[in-house]
Image (cartoon, helix red, strand yellow):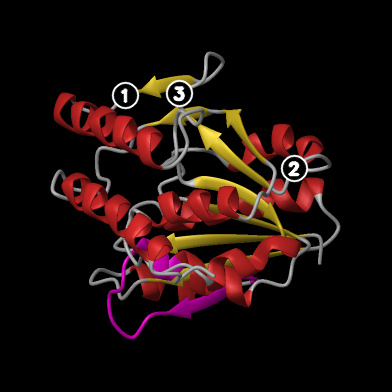
Amino acid sequence: MEISVVIPAFNEAKVIKNTVEEVRVFLKNNFNNFEIIVVDDKSTDSTLEMLNNIEGIKVLRNLRNHGKGYTVAKGIKEAKGELLLFMDADNSTKISELKNFIPAMKNFDLLIASRGLEDSNLKIRQDGVKAFLGRIGNLVSRLLIDKDIKDTQCGFKLCSSKVKWLYEKLTIDGFAFDFELIFLAKKYKLRIKEMPVTWVNNFDSTVRWYDYPRTIINLLGIHINNLLGKYN
């Protein structure tokens, strides 16, 4: 298996079918072997029903709503590919960005999509409140995680199956799991690179304003976990 694409989904009935189809077409045209794994985080709309009617994908379902971190990790643990990508169900960063990522994997262990680089292209930006809270969260994350990484939270990350074990160490179930993933990658001296992407904001996103303060608490929790030896 060359590549596994993991898509976490919660109440994505409006977009999930189109996203999966776009991913399937791209992978079919660019890879000999691939799998698409969609993990439903106990959606309350028709997401699961739609997924069950799409052929050629693997569908997993959480028995209760856990959060994005748990859902991504669950999919990655099931993945069989040599390359492991997770991406958002709303298709904010399109699968076609993978063309720029694959060559870079020869020299790195983890590639993270970034909206904060000079070459990044934000076609539709977030509203003012989310953008402001995002900047605060990003500032704190750069202080506590890595001062050189400009965007930890873009939901498009590629890694080699050799570092799949990182996902076994995650303790954060929610949106802040990206912080923990990058923190662990740095702790274990893995090779990380930010990659510029084209990104389109989805105004129907399930991320709410109150998720941002929670991520600040999670950031502090990561350092506490590290001091307590939970990542050893």
Nearer to us of marks 2 and 1 is 2
- Estimate the x, y position of residue 179 in percent, counting from the top left: 42, 49
Looking at the image, the residue that sits furthest to the bottom is: 63
Q: Is residue 54 visible?
A: no
Q: Nearer the viewer, residue 104 or 121?
A: 104
Which residue sits at x=52%, y=76%?
59
Q: Is residue 178 above or below residue 199?
A: below
Q: Disc 1 designates what residue? A: 125
**Residue lying farthest to the top in this orientation:** 118
Q: Is residue 55 above or below residue 192?
A: below
Q: Reply yes or no: does residue 61 show up in magenta.
A: yes
Residues rendered magenta in the picture:
56-71
Query: Could you say which disc has been placed on residue 43 in the image?
Result: none
Residue under pointer 2: 108
* Rendering coords of residue 184 (x, y %): 53, 56
Q: Are marks 3 and 1 in contact (CB under 8 Å)?
A: no
Horizontal arrangement in the rendering, residue 42 relative to residue 231 (left or right):
left
Identity, as a three-letter code, of the amino acid under mark 1? Arg
* Amino acid type of the residue tagged 2 in the rendering: Phe
Residue at the spot 29% in from the left edge and 59% down from the top edge: 221
First of labels 2, 1 by sequence position: 2
- Residue displayed at 55% across by 39% down: 94
Q: Residue at x 59, y 64 (%)?
A: 166
- Tell me residue 62's x, y (percent): 38, 80
In this rendering, the answer to whether 97 lies above or below 224 is above
Query: Could you tell which of marks 3 and 1 lies nearer the N-terminus?
Result: 3
